[in-house]
Image: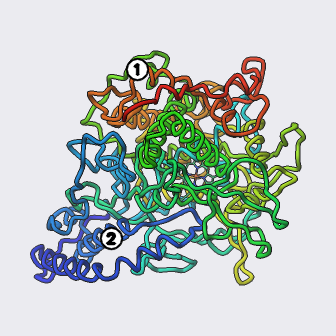
Amino acid sequence: KCRPRRTTTKKNSLAERQEKLNSDLQTLFARNRTRLPRNAKKIRSKMQSNMRQSSTDAFFINQITSLAIKTALNSTTARSTATDLSIDSQYCPFTDVTCDFTSKYRSANGSCNNEKNPLYGAANTPYQRVLPVAYQDGFNSARSLSVTGSDLPHPRTASLKVSPPPDRGVHENTASHIYAIFGQFLIHDISGTSATTDSDGVELDCPCGSTDSDCLPLEWPQNDLFLDQECMKFTRSSASFPDFDCNLSYREQLNLLSSFIDGSGIYGIDQDRADELRTFSGGLLATSEPLNTNNVQVTSGDYLPLSSDTCSSSSDPTYNCFLAGEYRTSENLGLVSIHTLFLREHNRIAGKLATNNPTWTDEELYQETRRIVIALLQHIVYNEWVPMINGSRDISPDLDTTQYFTGYDSSINPALTNEFSTAAFRFGHSLIRDKFNRYKTDDTRLAFINFTDLEFKSDYAYDIRGEGIFSIFKGLMNDNCWKFGSFGDQLQNSLFAQTTNGVFSAHDLLATNIHRGRDHGLRPYIDYVNYCHGIVVSEINDLRDLIGPTRRNALVSIYEDVADIDLYAGALLEKKDSDSYLAAPTFSCLIMEQFANLKKGDRFYYENDPSVNPGAFTLEQLTEIKKITMAGLICNNYEIAELAGNVFYTPSDSNPSVDCSTLKEQVDLSKWTGEL
Ligand code: HEM
Ligand SMILES: [Ca+2]
């Protein structure tokens, strides 16, 4: 019934459309030459309260792609015609970059990593797909219909049935809350999807009733007991060509960040931000020492520099947000405390290198320290964090040895997959607690804080009696995260809650994830069940090995057909293979595949040898790097007497507390001495 209409009029001929597209692009380019600097400023200075952002590059790519898509759509609803149009190479924004492949150091935006394809994994490039798209019109519009022809279930209705309120608050037995927040820190290094903006580069607001084709606000079901509002705003992610040749085969989304685990969240996602975060002296990063309202310094140790945005729960006093390498740093103070850890480690290492190497310049100290910090980050990710997802050490088997890794494969495109960003790695949302406990240096427990009081709010960082962010950080180590599979009340019913002109509104992050999957044209869940486990699902009981009976019933009550089930909803309801894993099989499958590619497809991966990586460490240095643990990193930089040997688990008999003094300075930095 959705058969494409044939278009035969002269007006719609391919040649005419192609000509129109070329001339529109010409106009766009002429206009943007003068308009872009203004847009750039606006985009950079706008604080995104909903965690979404754009960039000048993304803005431009979206404008070009949208023009092409609209030209195709204007004339026909046939999906095949989209591919008939082409973009003259002069208008394709993924132009080649100039690279020095002998450089020891990574670029700020991740370009120049892969020698044949320098844009692989770079910021402002498209996501890849594990499986082909499932847009409603085949190439652009959000998935909206059931295979039966009726509407797909409302994302909010699905959300409340997938994660019904009584399910909440079950803790992991062993994994700590820092495990979850470290996941957020990690994703902010590798994934940030660009949102659609207006022609001035400001993100579309998309309120109720908006008819803009890039808006999909959700009219809210009436009589919602947990969140009473008219609608949830929702802006489509901006459009991009799926490949560097600008083939217009379907709408892809754009990653604003470098896909590589390269510390871009610490150091900046472009050269401007990287420079903004430096002191240009002694290789150090800029810091601040927040003072409370009585001008008293909050706690010992440096804090992140302050941004010009405000992050206060009231208008007086005003507290600034914190500034780091990317735009979501201040999302919650737990995240800020992890950023602070890496900031302090950078400056600690730079100080040591400066003492050992008095002739090194600021630039040399900065770049050498950055290279070491990225290696420490990669080691913690692959050695401690990733294996906990499904208990597998498949992608990090070499880490216990002092050998180089030999698996670099230049044919691998390390760019994140859309399925990883838009569904699988959002598994972490279900691990986040509603309430954050705080503990002081002497282990006294302070009153807990609701998640929403830490969200884009810095107040508690200035709470001198509560020891600033230290007590929040300690809470992350002492508390267990929540069990995979359901959402907390705060993320489901109160996210970004605000009252504007007397009207209350909030976001449901679970509903958002489901809706975002449709916006991105992700295929239904069962296709990934087939991809990951080889199971062909034609009726609900075919899922019996993955999803228990109660949850299968929940899915039946939400969806008319198994082929409709959204990837996020289905995979979140799966049983974990073991209680000790952090995620269930389908998400694990997509996540593990991604982390394998981020390792094998990264020329600068810290374990690579000098024949691959011009910034390779000597084997002696690599041995030192591999001594780092998250616990050791913390002991170097926070004043803590003792902590669990593996801080991604809370202390227990099998993970006993260790005296911090024995973990300090695990990495012997004297191995980085001499000529560069
Ligand atoms: C701590 C509280 C957290 C909050 C409030 C939060 C909130 C959000 C929001 C609002 C988005 C954008 C949703 C959209 O419009 O599509 C998002 C995206 C995402 N979040 Fe979280 N998140 C949190 C923690 C985490 C954790 C712990 C993980 C994983 C371990 C995670 C993984 C992701 C991923 C993969 C995305 C997509 C990123 C992208 O834009 O490309 N988040 N999150
Ligand atoms: Ca990165």
x 68%, y 50%: residue: 302
Label 2 – label 1 distance at C-alpha: 44 Å
Spot occupied by residue 104 in the image (x, y as percentages of width and height) = 33, 39
| Residue 565 seen in this snapshot | no
Q: What's under tag 1, amino acid-wise?
A: Leu
Spot occupied by residue 122 in the image (x, y as percentages of width and height) = 34, 51
Spot occupied by residue 577 in the image (x, y as percentages of width and height) = 58, 26
Quarter of the image for the C terminus: give it. top left
Q: Which residue is mark 2?
A: 60
**Disc 2, SS:** helix
Q: Which residue is mark 1?
A: 619
Q: Furthest residue to the front?
A: 359
Left or right, 652 with reference to 19: right
Left or right, 676 with reference to 28: right
Q: What label does residue 361 carry, if any?
A: none
Q: Earlier in the sequence, mark 2 or mark 1?
A: 2
Left or right, 31 with reference to 473: left
- Category of crowding for the residue at label 2, using alpha-carbon neighbours closer than 10 angstroms: few (below 14), some (14–19), many (at least 20): some
State whether residue 46 is above or below residue 108. below
